[in-house]
Image: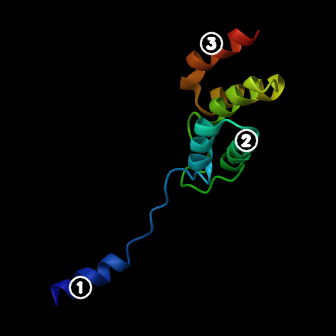
Amino acid sequence: MVLLLLAALGSCAPQVLPLYTWGSYEQDSYNYLHKANEESIQALLLAYQEVIENQEGSRETTPPGICADYGFLLLQLDRVAEGKAMLEKEIELYPESKVFVDRILKLIE
């Protein structure tokens, strides 16, 4: 009887959403780090955009570091204006990152 009651109560528990959703970012970043070819770069760029634009996690915001990482990759690809905008977005979302991101911004100026 007790087990039946516990099973019934356990099935009524609310589903917990993760804080952030990552899409294919983890696999694409792994592929980029191991291959670093044009295909893996394009896949990673799309993965960043997906994570930033389609957050379905409970926080409904971009995970910490994603905008900075995306911005840094854009800088490496000579897409300076876009990269700088993403770095500034990282500071906007996570003000505590200002110290680190400002160093990158100073290096590109």
- Tag 3's secondary structure? helix
Quarter of the view holding residue 76: top right
Residue 56 point in image, percent of width and height: 61, 57
**Lower sequence index among marks 2 and 1:** 1
Residue 60 point in image, percent of width and height: 61, 51
Q: Which residue is mark 2?
A: 45
Q: Does 56 sit above or below residue 98?
A: below
The mark found on residue 103 in the picture is: 3
Image side of residue 27 versus residue 75, left or right: left
- Tag 2's secondary structure? helix
**Residue at point 82%, 27% (across, down):** 79
Residue 97 point in image, percent of width and height: 56, 24
What amino acid is labelled 3 in the image? Arg
Q: Which residue is mark 1?
A: 5
Front-lying residue, 13 or 45: 45
| Label 3 packing within 10 angstroms: few (<14), some (14-19), many (20+) | few
